[in-house]
Image: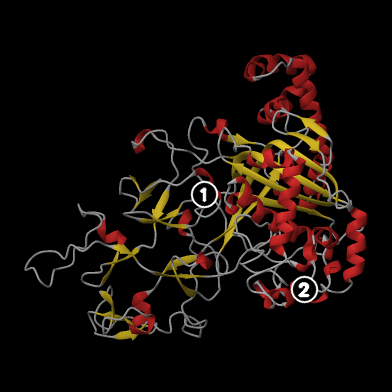
Amino acid sequence: MPRIFGKKQRAEIAGEVRQCQLLSTFGIGSIIDFVQDTVMVAGTDNWDSDEDWEVRRLFNNNLQMITGVEYFLAPKTAVNVNFIKSQDIESFIFPRKLYCPVCKHIIDAGELRNQRRKHRCFMPSESKTNKPCGGHLVASRFVIVCPNGHIEDFPYSWWVHHGKECTKSKNPRITMFNIDNRSDIDSLFVKCDDCQAWRSMANAFSKNAFAGENGYRCSGRYPHLGKDYQSECNETMTARLRSSSSVYFPVAISALTIPPWSREEIQLVEAEYGELTAWSRYGDQAMLDFINRRILSRVKKSCTATDLLAAYKLVKEQKNSAKVQSEADILAAEYDVLCREMVNEDEYVACEVRVPDDFERYFDSITVIDKLTVINALIGFTRVSPWNGELRSGCLAPLSVVKKNWLPAVKQLGEGIFFKFNQDVLSAWVELVGDRYQDMEMELAESFLENTRFSPQYVALHTFAHLLIRQLANDCGYSASSIKEKIYSTYMDDSDRPKMAGVLIYLAVADSEGSLGGLISIASDSERMRIVLKNMLRKAQWCSADPFCSNARKQGFHSLNYAACHDCVLLPETSCEFRNVLLDRVAIVGMPENLSLGLMGEAIMSMI
């Protein structure tokens, strides 16, 4: 990843990140601390500028339909340590304000363009006559952000002068220091060397620190799109530590590559869909000639030009029918495929296995997915507050100056286990618990989050997924952060939606070989799966925070959890599909004095 100081500065290598991190923690617009530089990942404007960008195209028709793009594009990856020969992701120095821990000066990165030692302070040394300070410059700890995704350097001069100009200089020198050798924010002060004005940083993080009639208004800057890009914004800025989690919230959505889209011929046709459509006006023979020239040589399995032509017609029919219009449609299509007894496609291979003894009443079927392909796409990011879950939300920051007909994405390969729950058992349990989750529903309505699948059933399925992931992490050797969930529960906003009751636990990595088969080996052995499920229930019956945890009704973000804490249910954020909320351990195991409150209370009774 190269970093750029200014237009005249030659790009240099800043550091390395994994491809999948560019769609999550270190995505477009995020700030990364490397050894020498702190940078912000640049936008996607140049991702399709190299000669072989087409080989990085990814396709998932369902995901394309709801995002409105024609395809997805994987990040460029470096193939040589020499930047000139590599295909790499750009980044910009940010924050531009740098701090010298020796002389305490704040220096702008633009002042270093002509310096031979890019990371050393050039201010006069107080201890060495006629010599520079030489301190190693580090990125400023503070930035200011707004809810629309804009971010700027902390305005130190504006702050120390209370929003006014310095009376002595147009570009005053600013120092920042702690008094009495302390390190807390209350002892941190900013001082102007020219007019000697000074001010504490203690109040800089208050909500209205930059508000008021003479407040600091947002200038609409998106540094990841270049310093010249600005947009209209009237929001009030707030100060944050640059490393704060609230500075960057990536917004990514994913979808499985399922039949018929998982077939190799479909994927090849998708890559040439535009050209094939252009040739279609000249008839099938012209299309067959084009297929023989451009596509057939890339087919790895036994397939004819006629098969590819049939695949094109299927793709065209599906695109014109516009069956997939929302995330609910995607989940419904995936659920239909996951419930099939056996599927053997190029990018999706699955078969049904025997349900473990003692759990037949809870599961209609268990499916082992030997080959799973997931497309994970970044659609934007937010600052200050997380994404509310609304796909058409206007609060997402743009990923490029010019809107593209594609989105950045990665293709992940892996394995999974799908549990189809018995709908009758679930319905009986929902009727039994009655209005237990009424408070949770009210809290969800008052929060900024949206989940149209919310119901007691969703709480039970979601909690089951969390408990099982924690148990599998102990039994299969994978870390809990690498295992993910996908909840298939009926959407409550439309009575015509198909009924769903399933949980997919999967592991997917951006590697050509995929995962190691740990989940498959457990699910394929019904006795081993039975032991895993029973151990899960035993462990879930007791939390180190009990009895407080089991009786809680207001835990987690916005009080959206009941009996769910870090000791018993919560997972790393990368594993949970809905921010570690809408969870309740009691929904699965019940209470010690009333096991019937739990969906699997009867199984626990048989274990006693």
Q: Secondary structure at mark 2?
A: helix
Q: Quarter holding the C terminus? A: bottom right
Is residue 102 left or right of 522 when viewed as pictured? left
Q: Amino acid at mark 1?
A: Gln
Residue 579 shows up from this direction: yes
**Residue in the foreground of this view, choosing between 547 and 195:** 547
Residue position marked by numbered label 1 in the rendering:
21
Residue 282 shows up from this direction: no
Numbered mark located on residue 246 in the image:
none
Numbered mark located on residue 440 in the image:
2
Q: Position of residue 423 (x, y in %)?
A: 90, 54
In the depicted structure, whether residue 555 falls above or below residue 82: below
In the depicted structure, whether residue 473 falls above or below residue 292: below
Q: Position of residue 46 (x, y in %)?
A: 49, 42
Q: Secondary structure at mark 1?
A: helix
| Crowding near the residue tagged with mark 1, few <14, some 14–19, many ≥20 C-alpha atoms within 10 Å | few
The picture quadrant where one finds residue 345 is: top right
Q: Position of residue 591 (x, y in %)?
A: 79, 71
**Residue in the foreground of this view, choosing between 494 and 509:** 509
**Residue in the foreground of this view, choosing between 51 and 592:** 592
- Residue ID at (53%, 52%): 401
Distance between the alpha carbons at the discs numbered 1 and 2? 33 Å
- Residue ID at (89%, 72%): 434
**Residue in the foreground of this view, choosing between 190 and 196:** 190
Q: Position of residue 245 (x, y in %)?
A: 51, 65
Q: Earlier in the sequence, mark 1 or mark 2?
A: 1
- Residue ID at (76%, 45%): 418
